[in-house]
Image (cartoon, coloured by chain):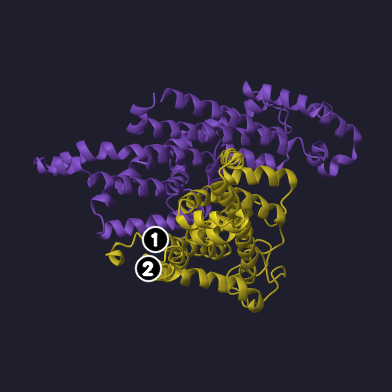
Chain colours: A purple, B yellow
Amino acid sequence: MTRLILYRLGYGVLTLFVVSLVVFGATQALPSDPAQAILGREAADPARLEALRQQLNLDQPLALQYWHWLAGAVVFDFGTSLAGGMPVAELLGPRIQASLTLMLITAVIAAPIAMAIGAFAALRRDRRFDHTSSMVTLVLAAVPEFAVGIVLILLLATGALQVLPAVYAGSSEDVLSSPDQLVLPVLTLGIAVSPPIIRMMRASMIEVLESEYVQQARLKGLPERTVIWRHAAPNAIGPVAQVIALQLGWLAGGVVAIEFLFNFPGIGKALMEAIEARNLPVIQAVTLLIAVVYVVVNLLADIVGLAANPKVRVSSR
Amino acid sequence: MSTATAAAAAPESAAPPRRPGLLRTAWRYHRTKIGVVLTAAVLLVAVIGPFVSPYSPTAMAGTPNATGIDGALFGTDNVGRDVFSRFLHGGYTLVAIAVLSALAGVAAGAVVGIVAGYLRNWADELLMRTNDMLLAFPQLVLALLLLSILGPRVWLIVVIIAVSHANRVARVVREATLKVVEQDFIKSAEAIGVPRWRIMATEILPNITSPLLVELGLRITYSVGTIATLSFLGMGLQPPTADWGLMINEGRVAITVQPWAVVLPVAAVAVLTIGANLITDGLSRASIGIDRGVEK
């Protein structure tokens, strides 16, 4: 088991290395001149072009450029932003915090609710609640999350029911100061991450409920409540934990469209602003960060999956 | 698995009761029927829309963000163009790009998956490892990264989405191939010296059509969502093109004054993805035989 985990860890590090190559390759190693691409029409001024090339280390050989960039990225130094000249890390710090807050609130609220719905659907298998929840998750899983967000805005922030603000207004430092502004983004993200959790919880719970030890517990005459909470539920959670972890990884990328829609000052909005302004160091930093979170969370999900699987835990040590 | 091949390979096993085809089994589910109706409705709008629209999608029809004016059923958008005309024109690009990238992705994934699953050599190892690396990127973020640097171009969107589909499809196809490869008819084809490419094309491929169809449905659903999201983020089709994702982006600021400019395209995207997903679910239920009622 330890060896398996070590293998996965080593593989994760390799993946991170490849991810950094992709991010760097896509942005800086292109055959076209990034400085020219960034400046666009203003590239006619040779002095500005030269200054920008210097700032981006474009005059150095590619391998050296990559090394400098990676060495910086490891200690969270992504150079200076091209707009305003602030260090990228300083610029992104509060944004990361805001996004993490959003993701954390979503996870804490959505995961237990989704698990409860899934478990209840399993207990009511083939009854009306089960069919309804299966249909609703199927529908919600299909619709792109920004469309879900817009529907929620149309329902709750415009027209007859104007109970919530449609977009976020405020800075990234005090996200928690106005909770009503967080409701719609959290609700949208929650709806987006829940369907797979609900389906997995239902499937896992059904499997456990049909197992012999649950049957045994029932035959012993234990009250149904004890059977479900002490015997069934704890054993059903293992595979679901993995799905929850994967969904959290998805959140890292999924926040981009949602933050853009709700004007929420997190990394997603920072990425869209950086793309708009062709702010290369910020684009590199944000995409790398999102990919790193994604890889690390997937790795954790893998390890959780290994740890939750008794066969692996016992046999191969 | 197609019954024809299985029966041909094992004629002695006294003709098993012929299972109805995947599509017919899927059609028995209500959700498939609903899905087909929803998808067909949106496709109809996308295909016929451009021919019946009252205005050109880029022509001015009145003052910006106006509703309830004569001649413009759903009012005008943020520049003053007819919302209904733009809605009718905005579908076919999204549908075409989505279907094209899904087809390309599933085709590429099928080739990679079959080769990896059948040959099981260094190519398998290499393909699956590079796949793992590709999977390390969230699809949308990878697309944003490349499009922001190379510029939002349609062919690039198709390539990026097709590639990110291909590696996910390849995994599924490889698993399906592994199950087929174990069967006797493959071994017998190998024994009589059928070339390996022919075995892959004529023995394995026809036996994995069910998972491939399910994947195609799934990938079309995802493609529509991703492409609409990219357009919504301003990294897809560019103004002044009429496109549902882009319309949502342009209309969202004035959503309180002129909701129609957002409601129509959002409804279309939502109905299309829901319809495609319902069909996919019907197909996948039919292919793995979840249907308890019929199996008994």
Q: Is residue B287 above or below residue A247?
A: below
For the question of whether residue A258 can be seen, the reply is: yes
Q: Residue at x 42, y 51 (%)?
A: A163
Which residue does the image show at 45% across and 69% down from the upper left?
A: B23
Front residue of this view, candidates A279 and B158: B158
Q: Residue A243 sits in which quadrant?
A: top left
The percent position of residue A146, horizontal first and vertical second, equals 53, 52
Occupied quadrant, residue B189: bottom right
**Most distant residue in the left direction:** A221
Of the 4 image quadrants, the one containing the N terminus of chain A is top left
Residue type beneath disc 1: Arg
Q: Chain of mark 1?
A: B
Q: How many marks?
A: 2
How packed mark 1 is, by other alpha carbons closer than 10 Å (few <14, some 14-19, many 20 or more), is some
* Residue A284 rendering spot, x and y as whole percentages: 67, 34
Q: Residues within 10 Å of mark 2 (few under 14, many from 20)?
A: some
* Front: mark 2 or 1: 1
Q: Secondary structure at mark 2?
A: loop
Residue B254 appearing in the image: no
Looking at the rendered structure, the secondary structure element under dot 1 is helix
Q: Which residue is mark 2?
A: B29
Give the residue at the far front of this rendering: B192
**Between residues B196 and B144, which one lies in front from this camera angle?**
B196
> B47 above or below A63?
below
Tell me the quadrant of the picture where the C terminus of chain A can be found: top left
Whether tag 2 and tag 1 are in contact, CB under 8 A, the answer is yes
Hey, what amino acid is under mark 2? Tyr
Residue A202 vertical position relative to residue B273 in the rendered view, above or below: above
Q: Earlier in the sequence, mark 2 or mark 1?
A: 2
Q: Which residue is mark 1?
A: B285
Chain letter, disc 2 residue: B
The residue lying at 44 percent from left, 34 percent from top is A301
